Amino acid sequence: MQRGGPAAKNFSKDDVRVVLVAPRNPLNIGAAARAMANFGFTQLRLVNAYEVAYREARSAVGAASLLASAHEYANLADAVADCALVVGTTSVGHRELQHPLRRLENGARLIRHARGPVALLFGSEKFGLSNEDMSHCHWLMRIATVDVNHSMNLGQAVAVCLYELSRDARAAAAQPEKLKVARAADTEQITAMLVEALERSGYIKPLTAESAKAKVRRLVRRLNLSNRDAPVVLGMIRQILWKLDGPQHS
Amino acid sequence: MQRGGPAAKNFSKDDVRVVLVAPRNPLNIGAAARAMANFGFTQLRLVNAYEVAYREARSAVGAASLLASAHEYANLADAVADCALVVGTTSVGHRELQHPLRRLENGARLIRHARGPVALLFGSEKFGLSNEDMSHCHWLMRIATVDVNHSMNLGQAVAVCLYELSRDARAAAAQPEKLKVARAADTEQITAMLVEALERSGYIKPLTAESAKAKVRRLVRRLNLSNRDAPVVLGMIRQILWKLDGPQHS
């Protein structure tokens, strides 16, 4: 078994049914659809949705067709009938839960390894999933928030869950790309020209010139310039030197 | 260095400044505040926010005080002045980016290991961060969505980023808790009573009784009953047997 690894080979986002149970706010339904489109999920199901026009929700930016093709069900049993795994989401308030409860990080991994269609249930904005709703679930999943008394917004909860299902653990472990650092010859040329500019402008005094030069050399190394930036910096100093030269020769 | 591991020891969520640059919709500002409260972040900053009353946004459920204490700035330089690391978020549309671009999974890890305050920038709903805004950033971060032409909703993007910053990789790797399975004595008693019920009800015929019993025994084992469920199932079958007995003795 992969440990928090990338999506399982057989995992298809089309196998995930996002099921909104008794949602009330059309804007939240639209937001859920938008998050689905963002992360590449396609199957939206609504159970007992409040009878207002949600199919044209303005919040479904980029997800109008997804929203238009959403399926409506009169009860939860029908909405999950074709699913092999039914997972409920909960913010876990005061209620005693009769189900295994997994953190999203963990539950998403199990969902990616599930065989067959998976229903991912989200309850109403106000009450979440009822005990009756939960009894249809194999297990429950929660987003680990700091304050269990305040649940997440429905659209945001859907976004976070689908993000985790889409997450690539290999990307997390990737090391920052290494910029090619400038060659020593270039940093030394920068050092020399900067010292010259500082001498001409009077920043470096003849008496302490030697120690000042060493200081500048160390500073230039600490900048850790890339081989792309080194010529730019060189050009800047060269131009300043040219200007510093100006008055002396004019 | 930890590889996608839990939050670094020194990481404090209070060190993260969530900076909304030129946000337009008060509901989105409220939603961002709500996500911050959900995940335990406290420092909200607004740059050049559209002059409408956002401080009372209804969408800031559970985050009213956080929203009330948000700081406003006239320009981005002031808003990030105290930060050691400035990270811009982008959906990466058509624009050529002049910055290192990291996936959220990766960037969040670097942020958790940063020393000192970190600014996390979100651009306006319509245009995202401008090139000018981005020039204040050390690097950029993107949420890996499937369709780069459709960006995420601002409140949802904030929620997903803060979720990733709060994510616990150890939880992802956790193995499902093992339920204690029923003892063989209990499953065998279930088998025996179920066989009896099936014989009395006529499901098992005398001619094929032996093979049927073995079938039932295998099926009961496949149910993999927990030691909590075994007595419940036993009670159910016992009651059914009692009822099956009824008519014969009355």
Image (cartoon, coloured by chain):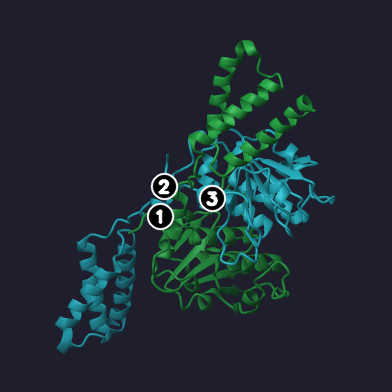
Chain colours: A green, B cyan
What separation in Å lies between label 2 and label 3 (alpha carbons)? 13 Å
Name the residue rendered at 28%, 79% in the picture. Answer: B245
Left or right of residue A180, residue A58 in this image = right
Residue at mark 2: B170
Looking at the rendered structure, the secondary structure element under dot 1 is loop
Considering the image in quadrants, where does the C terminus of chain B appear? Answer: bottom left
Closest to the camera, between mark 2 and mark 3, is 3
Residue at mark 1: A4
Crowd around label 2: few <14 · some 14–19 · many ≥20 (10 Å): some
Type of amino acid at the residue the image marks with label 2 = Arg
What separation in Å lies between label 1 and label 2 (alpha carbons)? 9 Å
- The x and y percentages for residue B116 are 59, 33
Residue at mark 3: B164
Type of amino acid at the residue the image marks with label 1 = Gly
Crowd around label 1: few <14 · some 14–19 · many ≥20 (10 Å): many
Q: Chain ID for label 2?
A: B
